[in-house]
Image (cartoon, rainbow, N blue to C red):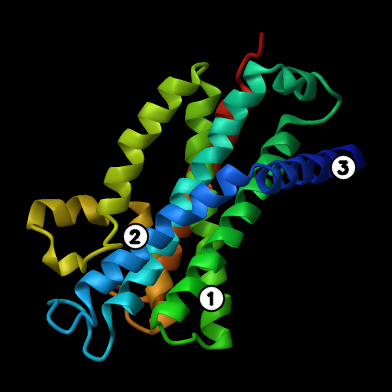
Amino acid sequence: MIKDLYAIYSIWLREMLRFFRLKSRLFGSIASPFFFLAFLGMGFGNGASLPGIPPGIGYVSFLTPGIIGMTLLFSATFAGLSVLWDREFGFLKEIMVSPVSRIAIVLGRTAGGLTTGILQAIIIMLSGILLGMKVPSLQGFLLSLVFMVLIATTFIGLGLAFASKMEDMSGFSLIMNFLIFPLFFLSGALFPLDRFPPVVKVLAYLNPLTYGVDGLRYSLIGASAFSPAVDFVILGSSCIALLSLGAYLFDTTEVN
């Protein structure tokens, strides 16, 4: 038990050190969401002419939770990519033959990806406030952290599931990009769900990120398409399912 806890902490610390030492990754992971937020926010102005946005809520306020969801989605994929990176350079084999459980390894990687994702998300939230979003209440901020944790953990599990069965980093990046962008655009992050055609709306309802973004909107600006209980239950169920799948596939993977 103590060995597993130490392994979780060590892997988490390694992920944190790697994140802060790789300045290009740190800059890139924040710059892209910030430019989405800044240029789309300036382009659509206060959002008064956009149907589906509640009255009195500017487009920057509407957009910020969506870009936070985008940040967490993109950041979560690095958890899977780091598995392939460690496999390539032999570190994964070293930790998998050590006397710690593979679940501890999964938890350590999840904790590392979760921490870096939330740090980036908070930076984007502060950027949204500087661009015009109202400062959320303390209760709203704490509730938003709950949804951030669920979003990040959900897609870390998805990334681990794919990384556990792949060996090529280029192939992993292509597949994840093929999945990430539809998930992002179908989540209602940029536009209200009511603006989607009926067929596309059905796909949006099947997307876990939709409920994460909606929960963030409720937490930060008090507007949502679903009740926060619905968002929490569906996103929480997706989180448990995908993280369990990722842990199972990682536990059964072979490292040569």
Pick the residue in front: 146 or 81. Answer: 81
For residue 143, the mark is 1
Mark 3 crowd level (few <14, some 14–19, many ≥20, 10 Å Cα):
some
Amino acid found under the numbered disc labelled 2: Phe
Residue wearing tag 2: 36
Give the label, 3 or 2, closer to the camera: 2
Helix, strand or loop at mark 2:
helix
* Label 2 – label 1 distance at C-alpha: 24 Å
Can residue 219 be seen at all in this image of the molecule? no
Q: Amino acid at mark 3?
A: Tyr
The residue located at (53%, 43%) in the rendering is: 156
Among the two numbered marks 2 and 1 on one chain, the one whose residue lies closer to the N terminus: 2
Examine the rendered structure and indicate whether residue 69 appears above or below residue 51.
above
Residue 230 placement, left or right of 242: left
Image position of 243 with respect to 247: above or below: below
- Which image quarter: residue 19? top right
Q: Which residue is mark 3?
A: 6
